[in-house]
Amino acid sequence: MRNRLSVIAACGLVFLWGCEDSEPETTQIPPTPVTTQRIVEAASEPGSWLTHGGNYQEQRYSDLTSISTDNVSGLELAWHFEFDTHRGQESTPLMIDGVIYVTSAWSKVFALDAATGELLWRFDPEVPKETGINACCDVVNRGAAYYAGKVFVGTIDGRLIAIDAATGEQAWSAVTVDQSRPYTITGAPRAAKGLVFIGNGGAEYGVRGYVSAYHVESGELAWRFYTVPGDGPDGAASDEVLAQLAAPTWHGNDYLEYGGGGTVWDAIVYDPELDQLYIGTGNGSPWDRALRSQDKGDNLFLSSVVALDPDTGTYLWHYQETPGETWDYTSTQQITLATLAIDGSTRQVLLHAPKNGFFYVLDRTNGQVISAEKFVPVNWAERIDVETGRPVEAPGARYEQEPFVSVVGGAGAHNWQPMSYSPQTGLVYLPVQQVPFVYTKQEGFEYLPGEWNLGVNLGDTPLPPGDDARAEIRAGLMGWLAAWDPVENREVWRVAHDGPWQGGTLATAGGLVFQGLTDHTFRAYDASQGSELWRFPTQDAIITAPISFAVNGTQYIAVTVGNGGGLPLTLPTFGDPAVTPNGRLLVFALGGTASLPALNLELPEPVLVEDFLRPEQSAEGFALYGRFCQSCHGIEALTAGVLPDLRRSPALADPELWRAIVLEGAFSPRGMVGFQGKITAEQTEVLRGYVAQQAARINPPAP
């Protein structure tokens, strides 16, 4: 059967009297190509969703009004599309000229008819599954870019691929990273001025961050900007500013081995009004500044917003939100542009709510701080001195001598889940989380290539036994949807959630805010006061943000559904995990008539193995699990259900099978690499015994 988009492309004439596989029409005007100008004018076609944040301002706001506070109760499922995996789903779809382009785990791309959900084409970059071990927070992908007839996607193994939007065939592919290092790409590319911009991730493992620009037609590298100094000039756009401005803020040479961090793994925003490109940079590598920079210096450009010339990559200005970053307080979170009336003046501003818990309003012409207020309780810093732009840090926050209990841990007060801004209400709708963390220096730190290198103790203390103690821990993990006024610098309303896990938001001109949660619901709130007006049971968690679009006069709301990402993978649920279906794209409309199929997923029983570990081996097993397994399979094997629950694995009862998987890599083609050369056969057995002990805690054997 002919590809439907190929037919559309073949029939793209100004006057059309009929063509194969389509109904006869008297006149058809071909769609305007998606260029910089079309995205600049996105407001003139509110039925489209042309770029990652909806428009170049990345406000995630829809001007559509057919779905409103008056009728949202009539919203029903119009159609759904099921992906081929239950791994994490973080994609923001695009909708252009009647076609949805959505990515899925393992960097796959799908083109769907926006009105019916019919699959038009599917693209699989065939990422080697063993590279998934380099992804700190699951093999997720946050979306694609569309420009000049091509769909662009970054892959987990570090490629940037251009796909012909009409046929789904690869146009070109560029390797954007040193694939011998543990780089990944999970973020969405952005495109403007004939260039496509892409960053990368991997700071936890030890890499050096940068952002690159490629020509959309050829895939040739146009420029590259590194965010931390190297051991000399790179022949890159960043050479001069790194030598003159950044290098003096770093000390010693250890960071050269460790990579330094500063990865640009999410926020990349083009500003057509000022012709500037803004990037948000990540944490240090390792986290502890004492290890990477002799506990001295601001370490530019970690945890910063940096403005670049989009044509050349030349440095324009920067603002560092967390100088001398030492807590995993990334500034990679979504950057939103707006024009606001502040103190009687009209200001072109940049709105930012990074991990560190302060909501920043910056003058985007020069990076000057206009305001910076706490949007969560923060104890690492008392305030931001607006005159200097620097935080006033609390004594002991850098855990120099004693552990520091921060109410804002490395998970952040706001992570990658997108916020939205409504010009109608003047409010930002912000998914907030409070996940405390105890920062303690890692004694005897040794850099281990290919592993997490944080420099702080992570999971080195067992969770307290007993349901009451664990319930108390869980009660300290909080989350809420906050409506934030960026002019008055205050929270206007909030909706509390059960736990910190939640999705991003969408604001609409219908007076609504949409948000999905990990309690398997999708909800709509009144944008002015926060009252809940609608909810839908989704059968799985939502952690990304919705979009809105229109086809043939009908407004739709769409959201990708599926658990995954850092928090669901690493924070304990203290109970049986949900057995999740494959990820889906759900699309809603007023009067929709579709329904989800009934779930029939049974949780396997834990595999009970007679305890064979000596008492001292339990501690060794705990340490081994924390080093090699915890980041994917959950603290003390308390998984969220995205990745296999090791307590229920048949391999647990079979020493040979366990060794083949864990040590020898029998499941590498599935993404589970072996640890040959890092642990011994004896340690593999100790690890099996430790997991078996955790399985026995679920359903202890009869005496």
Image (cartoon, rainbow, N blue to C red):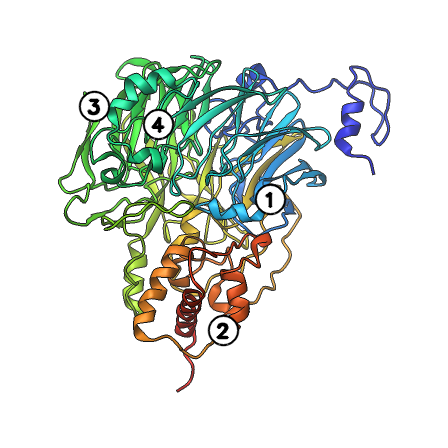
Q: Classify mark 2: helix, strand or loop.
A: loop
Callouts 2 and 4 close, C-beta under 8 Å? no
Q: Classify mark 1: helix, strand or loop.
A: strand
Q: Which numbered disc covers residue 386?
A: 3
Mark closer to the chain start, 3 or 2: 3
Above or below for 154 versus 399: above
User: Pointer 1: what residue?
Assistant: 585
Measured Cα–Cα span from mark 1 to mark 2? 34 Å
User: Pointer 4: what residue?
Assistant: 228
Position of the C terminus by quadrant: bottom left
Measured Cα–Cα span from mark 2 to mark 4? 47 Å
Mark closer to the chain start, 2 or 4: 4
- Given residues 53 and 235, the one toward you in this image is 235
Q: Measuring 51% from the left and 42% from the top, which residue is drawn there?
A: 90
The image position of residue 277, as x and y in percent, is: 44, 19
Q: Quadrant of residue 447?
A: top left
- Given residues 410 and 467, the one toward you in this image is 410
Q: Within 10 angstroms of label 3, few (less than 14), some, or many (20 or more) residues?
A: some
Mark closer to the chain start, 4 or 1: 4
Measured Cα–Cα span from mark 4 to mark 3? 25 Å
User: Pointer 2: what residue?
Assistant: 607
